[in-house]
Image: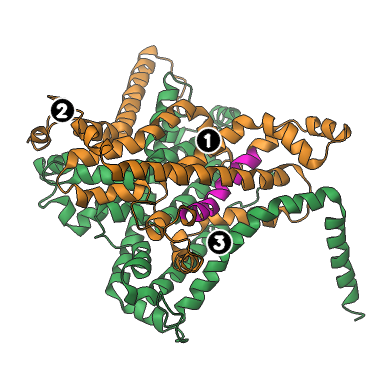
Amino acid sequence: MTSASPEKKRRGGLLREEFGNPERRTAYYMVLPALLIILVVAFFPILQAINLSLRQATVAVTGPFVGLENYVEMFQNPDFLEGFMNTIIFTAGSVFFEFLIGLVIALAINRAFRGRGLVRAAVLVPWAFPTVISAVMWRLMFQDQIGIVNYAANTISLISQPILSDRTLLLMGAILVDVWKTTPFVALLLLAGLQTIPGDVYEAARVDGANVWQRFFRITLPLLKPTILVAILFRTLDAYRVFDLFWALSNRELESLSTFVYEGVRISQLQFAQGNAASVFIFVTAFLIALFFIKVLGMQTSMEE
Amino acid sequence: MASATTTSGGRDALGSALFYVFLFLFVLVSMFPLIWIFKMSIITRAELFAAPPTIVPQNPTGSAYTQIFGDPAFQQALLNSAIIAGVTTVVCLFFGSIAAYAIARLRFRFKSPVMTLILAISFFPAVAIIAPLFLQYSALGLVDTYWAAIISDTVFALPLTVWLLVAFFKELPKDLEEAAKVDGATTIQAFRKVIVPLAAPGVFTTAILTFIFAWNEFLFATTFLFTPDTQPVTVVIPNFASQYTTDYGAQAAAAVVVTVPLVILVLIFQRRIVSGLTAGAVKG
């Protein structure tokens, strides 16, 4: 009692201080509804998914506890492995090109010029499209009888078979569509970051005789690092959970981690438990990716300025 | 940034010409699919299959549009999308704005964990919870109702809504509320009478972005909604590929109809949308 009491008193005092003050009490009441919705609809289900993934579960019954059996079966399932592989290739490919091209565009348009509004609108248009609809559009353009992309690629002998009937080409197509859709957005984020770098830093470097490359590697990149990390983390996690694009572009043929979960939950009743195991797998790995960015790469997470 | 001060005017002119060529290519690549799909939607079937493809439409026709607008399933899907996205926006703004006000303007100890928890949702893979949510919604009888989509969309749109609103609320002058409080207004009254009207432009931008988010949502809709009575356009249009098997014109027209409202919104509000979207990311 004696050893615990100061701690307890402090906690009691803290709570009393927080809830005794009418302004603070109001603040808690104001954030409570949003927090409750998030906890009930997003965080609680994760616990349930973990529970289901450890049981012989079906849509109808929770089933007996089976330990890690579902995970073992999942890792032996060729569909899961293919989806995992595709997801990794897709994530690495799309994020790499989006960042690279996005950075080039951001550097190029970081100045005052006529027609800025037009460029900004052009940037936002692909971003605002529903992903499934852009997939449908591109599918039409990849189509072997009427598709312009398929026609063009065929004419210059880039491809030997129709894009839509080859999974490797489909995966490359998916990366292309994602790069088309999201690069402008990455460019926009990086541009906003570039605009926070004061011009006199460059002026000083130029006076000191630094050339373009030195200025880029010694000033631009280091100062842009926080924005770059935010942009890449957002894009990585977004690409990692790819679902809509694969689903609609390949007409349900291309497998990703997310399509594997979806099939388990909604299509193949037999794979419900494995689907849950895969969903826990996605959650944990996505969390690890975020952790890697924050801890290893030193991403800033504070929202206080 | 990279535009080094050059002594020769000729090099400047060349550089600026190259710059505009680059811009033109960039805009063209961005817009090409929409333009091309629009072209596909207004040409005849024969022209659609022509090889090599025509660049300029030969005999423009609106028959694909007549066809899809005459399809009751498509009309219903448009209505469903509008209801789901509209209600999600309203619910999200309601909960989001009160939470954002507290975070932006009031002092309390656990502000940072609260904000982290809300923002964590934007990193949260939604697909990880569709199985448990499916079971919950089934138990509650919500499966295949608008609510299944609205509730899930709301949770995943909240981080965006709260983030944007916090940024907007922080920009408002603080003395106005102080004055209102000195005059005897409560915190809630200060929020309703002073902050909400002043923040209207920011709230409006947030509403547009939340609406776009919900309008574009696909995963929850395709998981929880099974019948044409509730399915939004994002679920219905990909199915057109099997329904209108080789009727590519109709598929193209449907895609155009769904994106045009978004394109118009974006064109009108581009300046505000950009400032909203990049507000958070660069603070780092």
Q: Is residue B74 left or right of residue B262?
A: left
- Work out whether disc 1 and disc 3 sit on a shared chain: yes
Residue hosting label 3 = A41
| Category of crowding for the residue at label 3, using alpha-carbon neighbours closer than 10 angstroms: few (below 14), some (14–19), many (at least 20) | many
| Category of crowding for the residue at label 2, using alpha-carbon neighbours closer than 10 angstroms: few (below 14), some (14–19), many (at least 20) | few
| Category of crowding for the residue at label 1, using alpha-carbon neighbours closer than 10 angstroms: few (below 14), some (14–19), many (at least 20) | many
Q: Which residues are magenta?
A: B149-167
Q: Earlier in the sequence, mark 1 or mark 3?
A: 3
Choose top left, top right, bottom left or bottom right for residue A99: top left
For residue B139, above or below residue A190: below
Q: Main secondary structure of the magenta part?
A: helix
**Hue used for the chain lettered A:** green
Count of numbered tags? 3
Residue at 92%, 80% in the rendered image = A2
Q: Is residue A22 left or right of residue A159?
A: right
**Mark 1 belongs to chain:** A
Residue type of the residue flagged with mark 3 = Val
In front: B5, or A76? Answer: A76
Residue type of the residue flagged with mark 2 = Ile
Mark 1–mark 3 Cα distance, whole angstroms, equals: 33 Å
Disc 3 secondary structure class: helix
Asked whether residue A177 is in view, the answer is: no
**Mark 3 belongs to chain:** A
Res. B55 mark: 2
Residue hosting label 1 = A192
Residue type of the residue flagged with mark 1 = Ala
The picture places residue B188, in percent across and down from the top left corner, at 77, 41
Q: Nearer the viewer, mark 1 or mark 2?
A: 2
Q: Which chain is orange?
A: B
Is B221 contained in the magenta span?
A: no
Mark 3–mark 2 Cα distance, whole angstroms, equals: 49 Å
